[in-house]
Amino acid sequence: QVQLVESGGGLVQAGDSLRLSCAASGRTFSISVMAWFRQAPGKEREFVAGISWSVGSTSYADSVKGRFTISRDNAKNLVYLQMNSLKPEDTAVYYCAARSKYVQTYNYWGQGTQVTVSS
């Protein structure tokens, strides 16, 4: 099992920056990919950014490219999401997720952290 705990959410103004952290514990050696998802009220959960745990390659949703950066610290089992130039439409609950090796879907999820961006 892998446990994920997010932190760093909060209330900010449009244009501000915020950094989310995700601490992974347990069988972290089994992780292949880490990612951030978000879910706004009344909307489906959507992919935000992902990073390969071993290689460090990254991918982003078009809506956050150039503004958000995902990174990892393998030694500390941490994943970060640096969010710059925040917009009100970025308001959502942000979830950290992990996908095990040889698995096609994200099979571990954190409890989520609220990010609210005021205009």
Image (spheres, rainbow, N blue to C red):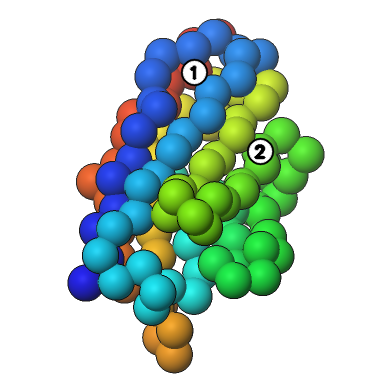
Residue placed under numbered mark 2 in the picture: 68
Among all residues in the image, which is located at the extreme right? 66
As drawn, 56 above or below 16: below
Among all residues in the image, which is located at the extreme bottom? 102
SS type, badge 2 = strand
36 lies left or right of 7: right
| Residue 116 location (% of width, % of height) | 42, 21
Q: Is residue 35 visible?
A: no
Q: Residue at x 59, y 61 (%)?
A: 51
Residue placed under numbered mark 1 in the picture: 117
Q: Quadrant of residue 53?
A: bottom right
Comparing labels 1 and 2, the label whose residue is closer to the camera: 2
C-alpha span from label 1 to label 2:
14 Å
Q: Quadrant of residue 17?
A: top right
- Three-letter amino acid code of the residue under disc 2: Phe
| Residue 33 location (% of width, % of height) | 51, 69
